[in-house]
Image (cartoon, rainbow, N blue to C red):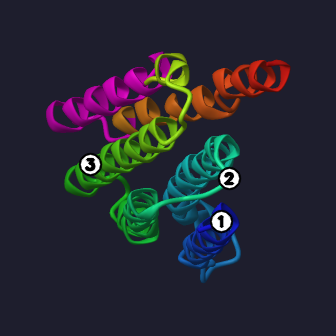
Amino acid sequence: MPKNRLEAISDGIIAIVITIMVLEISAPLVSDFSGLKEMLPGIASYLISFMIIANYWNNHHQIFLLIEKVHGRIIWLNFLFMFMISLFPVFTDWLAKTSFAQLPTLVYIVLMFLSTNSFILLQQDIVHSIEDKRTHMFLRVGLREWLTLAIEVIAFILALVTDIRWLPIVCIGVIGPLWIIPDLRIKNYLSWKKGN
């Protein structure tokens, strides 16, 4: 199957997820600053989730530059990844409505961990579908992926042991900047491939 069909449905799912998340933020019923204060957990949780999903979309697009066609395993791994992404509105809303209480924070971090793992599985399946075996070493799971997983585990532990509600969320917020720039190895690989 041509990859553009899979990319199109993925783009649609991600656009819907972002739209649902923003619609979950309720406008305050009062017209003073106390209303804005009530909105802060919703805006903060939306901002974190938006950043995560935007980074996923950007890197998802980047990894699909490596291939022209998709096979069944890539399709199902992509749907697993999309399933994880589709859960973000529910758990972002729960996080906001409970002002980052322990259980919603733990569940949110687990969702992030599962999303990261599903993206890594998809990424590695795409890499291994390339016939040139030299790419497998060149594009293996890198420092950024391992660092992301480590930060997610640290955030989970912090959510378990600390009473400071915002600390695990700040820890999660550190992941965003790691993924803003798409994987430069892909750009370098595509340049190298074009030169050969």
Q: Is residue 44 magenta?
A: no
For label 3, the SS is helix
Q: Residue 8: where, in percent of width, then height?
A: 68, 71
Tell me the distance, in whole angstroms, between the alpha carbons under discs 3 and 1. Answer: 33 Å
Task: Give the residue furthest to the left.
Answer: 161
Return the mark for residue 2.
1
Q: Earlier in the sequence, mark 1 or mark 2?
A: 1
Residue situated furthest bottom in the rendering: 29
Which span is picked out in magenta? 141-166
Q: CA distance from mark 1 to mark 2?
A: 6 Å
Q: Are marks 1 and 2 in contact (CB under 8 Å)?
A: yes
Label 2 vs 3, first from the N-terminus: 2
Q: Amino acid at mark 3?
A: Val
Element at badge 2?
A: loop
Judging by the rendered image, the residue that carries numbered circle 2 is: 68
Whether label 2 touches label 3, CB < 8 Å = no
Q: Quadrant of residue 4?
A: bottom right
Rendered position, 41 above or below 106: below
Task: Inspect the image, locate mark 1, and give the three-letter code of the amino acid beneath it.
Answer: Pro
- Report helix, strand or loop for mark 1: loop
Residue 147 badge: none
Horizontal side of residue 5 vs 92, given as left or right: right
Q: Residues within 10 Å of mark 2 (few under 14, many from 20)?
A: few
Q: Residue 110 — which label?
A: 3
Q: Position of residue 196 (x, y in %)?
A: 79, 19
Instruction: Write the residue at 57% across / 53% down.
Output: 53
Residue lying at 84% horizontally and 19% vertically, measured from the top left: 195
